[in-house]
Image (tube, grey):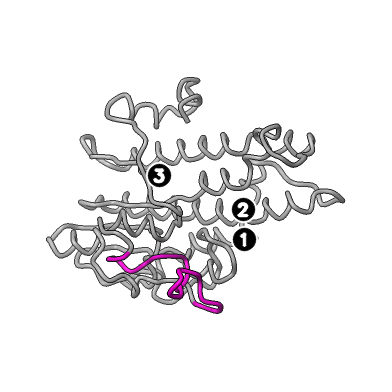
C-alpha cells in the first residue's frame, strides 16, 4: 500500500494517513479471521469471547469433522454494536465476521455476514445469493428493502461484467485449471464486497449512525491467491509467465478498488467523522 500511496494511486487512504496516523498492528497466531475480527469487535481474547476457530474444535484445538461454522450465538460476550446500542447510540453494521444471525440491537441496523454460511461450502469470505438467508438483518424488514442489491450481487448477476473489466478473464484451456479456480473464488469475494459496499452506502445515505461499520475481504483474498503471480521468483515452484502477466497486478488492483470504495463511504459521512481502517 505504501508504494501505491506514494504513487498517488490510493488517494483516499493517503489522505487519511496524512491527516491522522498510519501504522502496523500486532496480531494473534494463527491468524484465523473469525477469531481476530471477533477479538476486535469485543476487545476480548478468544478464550473469553468463545470463537477460537472457523469451526468447533476438539480438546486438541483441531476442527471437529462435520462441525458447523461459528455464529453470533457462539459469542459469549457483547460486541461493540451491542454495547453501543445498550448505551443509546445508533449503530449500522454491515458484513462483520461472525455476525449471523443478525442480533437485536437497540437503534441498530445490522446486516449480517454471509461468511459463516460460505465457510460451510469451503469458502471463507462473504458471497451473496438471490434467495438470501433467514435472519440476515435486524430489523427483519430491512432484508426486503435490500433484496434488489442482493440479487444484483448474485454469482451470475451484473457484477460479473464489472469484475471482468477490473481483473480480466482467465482462459478455459489446458494449464489454467488452478488459476481458473482461484478466479472463480475471487469473484465470490468481489461480488460479496461490492454488494456490502452498496448496502453500506445506501444505509449511510438514509442516516449516518453514531457507529458505522463495514467489512471487506477483497485485499485479503487477493493476497492469499495472487502473491505467487506478483513475485513468481520468490516461490519454490514454477509459476508460468503467462499466468503472472494476467494476474500479477490483481493485488494492487484490489487496493485501488478498496480506495475507491473508501472514497465513496467518506462522501456519505459528515466532516469531523472519526474514521478507522483496520486490517
Circle nearer the viewer, 1 or 2: 2
Query: Residue at position x 18%, y 61% from top?
Result: 83
Assess whether residue 250 is covered by the magenta stretch. no
Q: CA distance from mark 3 to mark 2?
A: 21 Å
Query: Residue at position x 50%, y 77% from top?
Result: 67
Q: Which mark is residue 187?
A: 2
Assess whether residue 62 is covered by the magenta stretch. yes
Q: Earlier in the sequence, mark 3 or mark 2?
A: 2
Q: Residues within 10 Å of mark 3 (few under 14, many from 20)?
A: few
Q: Earlier in the sequence, mark 1 or mark 2?
A: 1
Q: Earlier in the sequence, mark 1 or mark 3?
A: 1
Query: Residue at position x 25%, y 55% from top?
Result: 43
Q: Secondary structure at mark 2?
A: helix
Q: Are marks 1 and 2 in contact (CB under 8 Å)?
A: yes
x, y percent for residue 201: 38, 49
The residue that mark 3 highlights is 279
Which stretch appears magenta? 47-67
x, y percent for residue 236: 71, 40
Q: Secondary structure at mark 3?
A: loop
User: Which residue occupies the foreground of this view, 193 or 66?
Assistant: 66
Q: CA distance from mark 1 to mark 2?
A: 8 Å
Tell me the quarter of the picture where residue 45 sits.
Answer: bottom left
**Would you place residue 207 above or below residue 111 in this image?**
above
Q: Secondary structure at mark 1?
A: loop
Q: CA distance from mark 1 to mark 3?
A: 26 Å
Q: Which mark is residue 185?
A: none
How many numbered marks appear? 3
Residue 177 in view of the camera: yes
What is the magenta segment's predominant secondary structure? loop
**Would you place residue 5 above or below residue 146 in this image?**
above
The residue that mark 1 highlights is 155
x, y percent for residue 58: 46, 75
Amino acid at each position: 500500500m505504501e508504494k501505491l500511496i506514494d504513487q498517488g494511486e490510493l488517494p483516499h487512504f493517503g489522505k487519511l494517513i496524512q491527516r491522522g496516523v498510519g501504522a502496523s498492528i500486532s496480531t494473534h497466531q494463527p491468524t484465523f479471521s473469525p477469531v481476530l475480527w471477533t477479538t476486535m469487535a469485543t476487545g476480548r481474547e478468544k478464550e473469553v469471547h468463545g470463537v477460537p476457530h472457523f469451526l468447533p474444535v476438539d480438546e486438541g484445538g483441531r476442527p471437529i469433522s462435520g462441525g458447523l461454522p461459528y455464529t453470533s450465538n457462539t459469542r459469549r460476550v457483547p460486541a461493540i454494536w451491542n454495547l453501543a446500542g445498550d448505551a443509546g447510540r445508533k449503530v449500522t453494521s454491515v458484513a462483520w465476521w461472525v455476525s449471523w444471525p443478525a442480533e437485536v440491537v437497540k437503534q441498530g441496523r445490522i446486516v449480517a455476514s454471509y461468511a459463516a454460511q460460505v465457510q460451510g461450502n469451503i469458502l471463507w469470505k462473504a458471497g451473496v445469493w438471490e434467495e438470501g438467508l433467514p435472519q440476515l438483518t435486524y430489523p427483519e424488514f430491512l432484508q426486503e428493502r435490500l433484496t434488489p442489491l442482493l440479487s444484483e450481487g448474485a454469482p451470475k448477476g451484473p457484477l460479473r461484467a464489472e469484475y471482468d473489466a477490473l481483473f480480466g478473464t482467465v482462459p478455459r484451456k489446458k494449464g489454467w485449471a488452478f488459476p481458473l479456480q482461484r478466479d472463480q473464488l475471487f469473484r465470490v469475494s468481489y461480488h460479496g464486497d461490492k454488494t456490502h459496499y452498496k448496502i453500506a452506502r445506501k444505509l449511510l445515505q438514509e442516516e449516518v449512525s453514531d457507529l458505522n461499520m463495514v467489512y471487506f475481504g477483497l485485499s485479503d483474498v487477493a493476497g492469499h491467491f495472487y502473491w505467487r503471480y506478483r513475485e513468481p521468483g520468490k516461490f519454490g515452484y514454477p509459476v508460468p509467465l503467462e499466468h503472472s502477466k494476467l494476474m500479477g497486478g490483481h493485488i494492487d488492483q484490489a487496493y485501488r478498488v478498496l480506495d475507491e470504495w473508501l472514497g465513496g463511504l467518506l462522501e456519505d459521512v459528515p466532516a469531523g467523522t472519526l474514521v478507522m481502517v483496520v486490517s
